[in-house]
Image: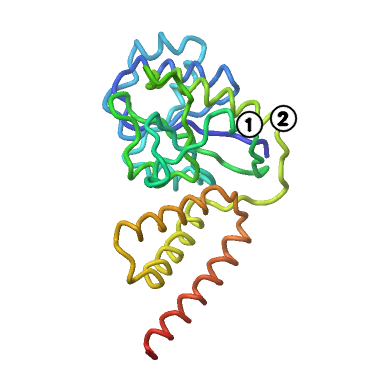
Amino acid sequence: MPLDAIFFFVRPKYPGNIGSIARVIKNFGFLRLILVNPRCEINDEAYRLAAHAQDILKNAKIYNSLDDALNQEKINYVIGTTARIAGDRHPLRNAITSDKLRELSYPQDAQIAVLLGGEDYGLTNEELEKSDLVVTIPTSEEYPVMNVSHAAAIIAYELSLAFRKGRKLPYRAAEYHEKEILKKFLLELADQVLADFPAPKKEIYKRIIVNWVGRAFLTGREVHSLIGFVKRLLYLVKTLKREE
């Protein structure tokens, strides 16, 4: 199964941008667009700006929530995008630059989602938390925020290079819901082990755990083995606490 990516446009506000994104992703060989909780319709302007990518608009799916979209589309790996990055004290928005996408190795059967935020304020923190990897485009500090369709073009270009030239790995990538279960048990373990830590510091550690799971490109077998391992650790920690 060839590598593919689905572009998720979250809360689009302007039909023109929907059409422009359809056009640029088709330029680089991607044919699937999903709209999440759109604030506009796919109208004549969208079709005009899509040009020869009108088929992508006709086949675009619409979901009311990001969770539903990720689960229904059987996503293995989520790439979030942001123009607002942060330092080590705020790991939620730690991001790699877009050119690094071509350097990663992708499992052969991975179903990858690229999240693009709405035109006015991009992706929320809650939406970025669903991302396995956060990517930013290294624009000028004087004017760092790009039009969303331009950003989509750069991400699509980098992924097209990665998928065409990158090393393909012959194993089943862990699915979105499988990694969510692993994160749930790891975060529960963190709550137990870090019970005496200040809440802000605990949240930083927990975000680092989430980032680690996301960047690992885990296989389905690895995730299930880790879930069993973490559940065993949880049992031992809780047993020790009861005996104290």
Dot 2: element = helix
Q: Secondary structure at mark 1?
A: helix
Identify the mark at residue 102; answer none if there is no mark. Answer: 1
Q: Nearer the viewer, residue 7 or 48?
A: 7
Instruction: Give the residue at mark 2.
Output: 165
Instruction: Return the residue found at the far bottom.
Output: 243
Q: Which quarter of the figure has residue 61?
A: top left
Identified at 55% across, 25% down, the residue is 156
Where residue 59 appears, x then y in whole percent?
Answer: 46, 26
Circle nearer the N terminus (2, 1): 1
Q: Residue at x 33, y 16 (%)?
A: 43
Q: Position of residue 121 (x, y in %)?
A: 29, 29
Residue sitting at 37 percent across and 45 percent down?
90
The quarter of the image holding the N terminus is top right
At label 2, the amino acid type is Lys
The image quadrant where one finds the C terminus is bottom left
Please determine whether, in this image, residue 110 is positioned above or below residue 118: below
Q: Dot 2 surroundings within 10 Å: few (below 14), some, or many (20 or more)?
A: few
Q: Are marks 2 and 1 in contact (CB under 8 Å)?
A: yes
103 left or right, relative to 96 = right
Which amino acid, by three-letter code, is at mark 1?
Arg
Residue 216 locus on image (x, y percent): 58, 51
Q: Is residue 172 above or below residue 161?
A: below
**Residue 223: quadrant of the picture:** bottom right
Distance of label 2 from label 1 (alpha carbons): 8 Å
Q: Is residue 147 above or below residue 230?
A: above
Report the number of numbered marks. 2
Q: Is residue 60 above or below residue 222?
A: above
Question: Residue 15, how many percent across, how many down?
Answer: 33, 17
For disc 1, the neighbor class at 10 Å (few under 14, some 14 to 19, many from 20) is: some
